[in-house]
Amino acid sequence: LVGPIKGMRGMWSACAVMAGLSQGGGVGLSLANWMVHGDPGADIWAMDVARYGDYATLAYTNSKVRENYSRRFRITFPNEELAAARPLHTTPIYDRLTDHNAVWGAGFGLEHPLWFQDKGLEPKEDITFYRSNAFKNVGEESRAVRERVGFSEASNFAKYKVSGEGSAAWLQRLFTNSLPKIGRTVLTGMLNPQGKIVGEFSISRIGEEEFFLFGSQAAEVHHPRWFLAHLPENSKIRFETLSLSMVGLTVAGPRSRDVLQKLTDTSLATKDFPFMSFRKVNIGMAPVWLSRMTYTGDLGYEMWMAPEYQRYLFDLIWDAGREFDMRLFGFRALITMRLEKNFGTWFREYRPIYTPLEA
């Protein structure tokens, strides 16, 4: 666990090293670079203290450490999910998705559906170096999105809100793309002084000095560290990490517009609600921030709402999608489809060892 401690200026961590003699030189070099130059000089995510959030309590840590040490010399299989300290964080529709036979994964302490097992079969993935029992179902989920319409949880993204006098000018200095107009979204990178990628976000503007940022959930401590380090002194800018105070759902596929149009008086026609639009609308009785974009690359919509509305919206949209043979899809299908569309993601294609051209 290496790096600056959140909320404690000048406090650094260099601990939890299992083999101190062999790793000490690299840890020391990284910390020295970081303290002197403001950058560790390499991609050190595998030991960055920012990999963990406030969910990593002492009890959580004890459970995960015991699990990890007991497996030290065991083979780790592709896509293997470990059970210790789970479930911890769940969204309001956790039971709904469990009833649909979700196979669960966890990221940054939050449970999210990986894929959906057939009814009557145990919702568990076989660990193997070959194609697992998930392969057929993930393929069917992907085809449902490409050919009809799919429905999924979307809460496992980091969500931030930036507001206050000077917000627009500050964000424009940090990001590579021009800021959007009100009611619009753009995708943008964030670079360090060496021109390397330190972040990738979608940014939605809801006022002259008011924005939502959406990024990698795994970086929910990592990215705020960068933002807050570059916040002007004595500024009136407010940077908020929203976490689970905002949750999400997504509908994607050629019939996604038909599903949602049944539930809102707002016209979702392309001329009225074009690609990359971001507006507050009512879906049924619930207010949502509706975004005309998806990570699958299809016609589709992301909906962001207060957690108290998520169960109502899930039931409403699921019922509306029955006539279109709508299918639930999980994170595995999402990753498959974003790769087909050549969409990059943080910590995989986008890392602080790459420039935008290299990525």
Image (cartoon, rainbow, N blue to C red):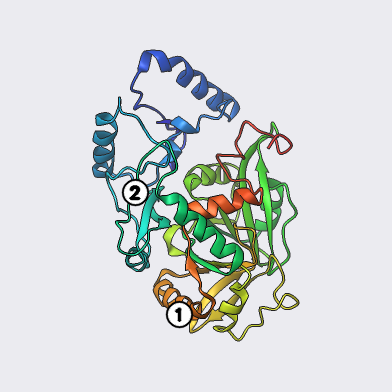
- Left or right: 153 with respect to 268? left
Specify whether residue 166 is in view: no
User: Residue at label 1?
Assistant: 319
SS at badge 2 = loop
SS at badge 1 = helix
Task: Name the residue: 66% across, 44% down.
Answer: 190
Q: Position of residue 215 (x, y in %)?
A: 56, 52
Dot 1, crowdedness within 10 Å: few (<14), some or many (≥20)? Answer: few
Does residue 284 lie above or below 174 as drawn? below
Does residue 158 lie above or below 184 as drawn? above
- The one of 124 and 165 positioned closer to us in this rendering: 124
Q: Position of residue 40 (x, y in %)?
A: 55, 27
- Left or right: 200 with respect to 311? right
Q: Position of residue 235 (x, y in %)?
A: 61, 52
User: Residue at label 2?
Assistant: 55
- The one of 164 and 74 positioned closer to us in this rendering: 74
- The one of 348 and 81 positioned closer to us in this rendering: 81
- The one of 34 and 344 positioned closer to us in this rendering: 344
Going by the numbered disc 1, the residue's amino acid type is Asp
- Left or right: 22 with respect to 57? right
Task: Name the residue: 36% across, 44% down.
Answer: 81
Q: CA distance from mark 1 to mark 2?
A: 34 Å
